[in-house]
Image (cartoon, rainbow, N blue to C red):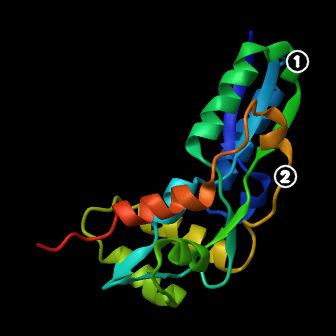
Amino acid sequence: MGYTYTSLTGAGDHLGFAPAHRATEQLIRDSGLSWTILRNGLYAELFGALLMWDGDAVESAFGPGALAAVAREDLADVAAIVAGDPARHAGRVYDLVGVPVTAQAVAGQLGTGHRTIGLGEYRRRLLDTPDFLPFQPPMLSSIATNIRHGFLGATSADLQDLLDHPARDVLAIAAAAASAARPQFS
């Protein structure tokens, strides 16, 4: 028996939740069993959903930073491919990231403007969100900080090398997620 673990992209080592993933990876490597580690990039769907609407424009704390976003469906496809031939992928670590996407590009796809807010303002808004669990504001602040400062824009060929089809359009996916989060006024 072997393990296939869905972890976090290597570019995400600055994220607050990375140490738990790296510790789990080490436990799997030390298990003596066969293993494959799929280091998933952050989702295009999440990136779009984290954009906030202010009237007809979107805001974010991402600044000019980019996220090498990946479609969740592409990650699922890769996991199925690896699970279908575990011996071929044993002992491998794959960094599954897509193409870099910016908040400005998503706004352009939506035909709207983008405004950058400060990280302090973003943290305040997160802390004022009543439905969030205690771990969510620091986790989301960590993501915004890392995107803003360029830590999550690195690419890798692993995703496309493993897929049996072209990677999905992450800009369109992020824009669809942002559009779905747009407040509806009656």
Q: Amino acid at mark 2?
A: Ser
Taking the view exactly as shown, the residue that stands out farthest to the top is 1
> What residue appears at the point 68 percent right and 78 percent down from the top-left corner?
65
Q: Nearer the viewer, residue 56 or 142?
A: 56
Q: Decide: few, some or many residues near mark 2? Use Cα within 10 Å; few <14, some 14-19, many ≥20.
A: some
Name the image quarter holding the C terminus.
bottom left
Q: Quadrant of residue 124?
A: bottom left
68 to 162, vertically: above or below: below
According to the picture, the residue beneath numbered tag 1 turns out to be 88
According to the picture, the residue beneath numbered tag 2 turns out to be 156
Residue 157, can we see it? yes
Q: Percent position (x, y) of residue 128?
A: 30, 77
Circle nearer the N terminus (1, 2): 1
Q: Percent position (x, y) of residue 61?
A: 53, 82
In the rendered structure, the answer to whether residue 136 lies left or right of residue 27 reads left
Q: Quadrant of residue 6?
A: top right
